[in-house]
Image: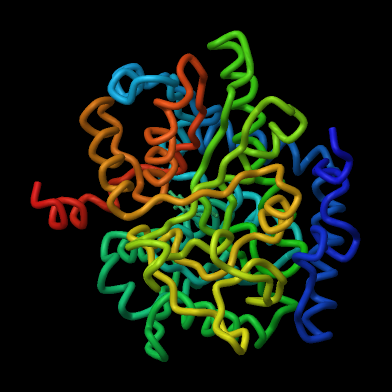
Amino acid sequence: MDKALSPEVMPDAKGMFGEYGGQEIPPQLKAVMDEITEAYYRIRQTEAFQNELRSLLKHYVGRPSPIYFCKRLSEKCGGANIYLKREDLNHTGAHKINHCLGEALLAKSMGKTKVLAETGAGQHGVALATACALMGIPCEIHMGEIDIEKEHPNVMRMKVLGATVVPVSRGTRTLKDAVDSAFEEYLKDPKNFLYAIGSVVGPHPFPMMVRDFQQIVGEEAREQIQEMTGKLPDMVTACVGGGSNAIGLFTAFFGDENVRIVGVEPSGKGLDTPDHAATITKGKPGVLHGFRCYLLQNDSGEPLPVYSIASGLDYPGVGPQHSYLKDLGRVEYVSATDEECLEAFVALSRLEGIIPALESAHAVAYAMKIAPELPGKNILVNLSGRGDKDLDFVVNRLKL
Ligand SMILES: *Cc1c(COP(=O)(O)O)cnc(C)c1O
C-alpha cells in the first residue's frame, strides 16, 4: 500500500493532505483548533471513548448497516451486479449520525457548553440535534430563511429535539450565509463552544476527525461484501458533496489495488452551464472556510454560487483529502446530472422498493451508467441516506 495513502500518515502534523487542508485561520482560532486536535487524539485512544462510541453505533444507530444486492436493478441495467451499503437505514436516515455522535462525545468530554453548526437542507442539523439531545448538550443550528421555508419537516425535527434554530436573514439567506452566521456566534466564545462541522471540510482537525468517524462504513462494507460474494468488489462508488460518506467508504479500500474507487459529483444542469457543483471536475485549488481544496471560484478567488438538485451536495469546495486523492489519481472523480439523478431515484424506488436521498441517487446513477460496460463485475454503492425528505420535490418535479 502506498504509504502516503495510509490513513495513519494522513494528514501530516499541520493537517495537510499534500498541498490541501491545513488551517487558514486567525492565530487565536488556531490555538483553539490545536486544543481540539489534542483532545481528540487523547480521548480516541481511551477505552472508555471507544467503548461508548462502539456501543452507541450498535445499539442507537443500528450498526452494522446491511449491504444489499439489487437483483432487479442489476438485471435492468445489464452487466455489473450492483450492491448497496445501506446507510439510509441508520437512525435519522443517513450517514451523518456517525460523525455527529463522535463530535458530540468529544464536546462532552471537553466540557463544552454549546455545540453549534450551520445546516443547508437540515440533514446535518437534525443529526447533530439528535446527538446533542442524547448527550444532554445545548445545540444551536443556524439556517438560512430560504432553507427554513423549504425544509419545514427538518426544522420541526430540530425544534422537537430541543435545538435552537437561528434563522439567517443576511445575503442569499442560504447555506453560505448560515456558515458565516454560525461562525460569528462561535467566535464569541470558542473556548466553551464547539463548532461541529458537517463533513470532511473546514480547518484541521475536522477533515481528519470526521473521516475517522465515518471509516466504520467502509470497514463494515469490506467485510460484508466478501462474506456475501466471496471476494472484494471491482468498484466502490459514492456521491461527493464535502465528501464524508465517500471517504468513509473509500478508506477501507485504498490498499486494494484492484478495486476501482469512484467519487460522483453533481453536474446539475450540465458541466458547461454555471448550474452545477462539480468542484473537483471543474474547480481549481483555493481557500474556503479555513482550508485549502479544489474550489469553484471566480478570477479573484471568491467562491462561485453553486447549484445541485441535492442540497447536501451544493458546496463550492470539497474535502482536502479528496483534493489530494484526485491529484494522486487513486480515486476517479466523475459526475451525474440532475436528470440522471432523478432517473436513478425512480429506478431504485420502483425496482427495489428503496427510496434514496437525491444525494445518494447521484452514486446510483453512475453505477447504472457504468454497469453495462462491466459485465460480471461487482459494484458497491454507498447509499448515504433515505429519500423521505425529497418526496414532495420529486413528486412535483416529475408530476408523479
Ligand atoms: C449531507 C449528505 C451528503 C453529502 O455530504 P458528504 O459529506 O459529501 O457525504 C450525502 N448524502 C446524504 C444523504 C447527506 O445527507
298 w.r.t. 257: above or below: below
Which residue occupies 38% across, 63% down? 308
| Quadrant assignment for the N terminus | top right
Left or right, residue 236 beside residue 338: right
Left or right, residue 58 beside residue 161: right
Q: Nearer the viewer, residue 363 or 184?
A: 363
Which residue occupies 61% across, 37% down? 261
Q: How is the image coloured?
A: rainbow
Q: How many marks?
A: 0
Spot occupied by residue 385 in the image (x, y as percentages of width and height) = 41, 43
Quarter of the image where one finds residue 47: top right
Left or right, residue 37 beside residue 365: right
Which residue occupies 70% across, 33% down? 252
Q: Nearer the viewer, residue 399 or 145?
A: 399
Spot occupied by residue 210 in the image (x, y as percentages of width and height) = 66, 53
Q: Nearer the viewer, residue 296 or 360?
A: 296
- Furthest toward the left, the residue is 399
Spot occupied by residue 339 in the image (x, y as percentages of width and height) = 28, 51
Which residue occupies 44% across, 21% down? 80
Spot occupied by residue 318 in the image (x, y as percentages of width and height) = 60, 62
157 w.r.t. 4: above or below: below
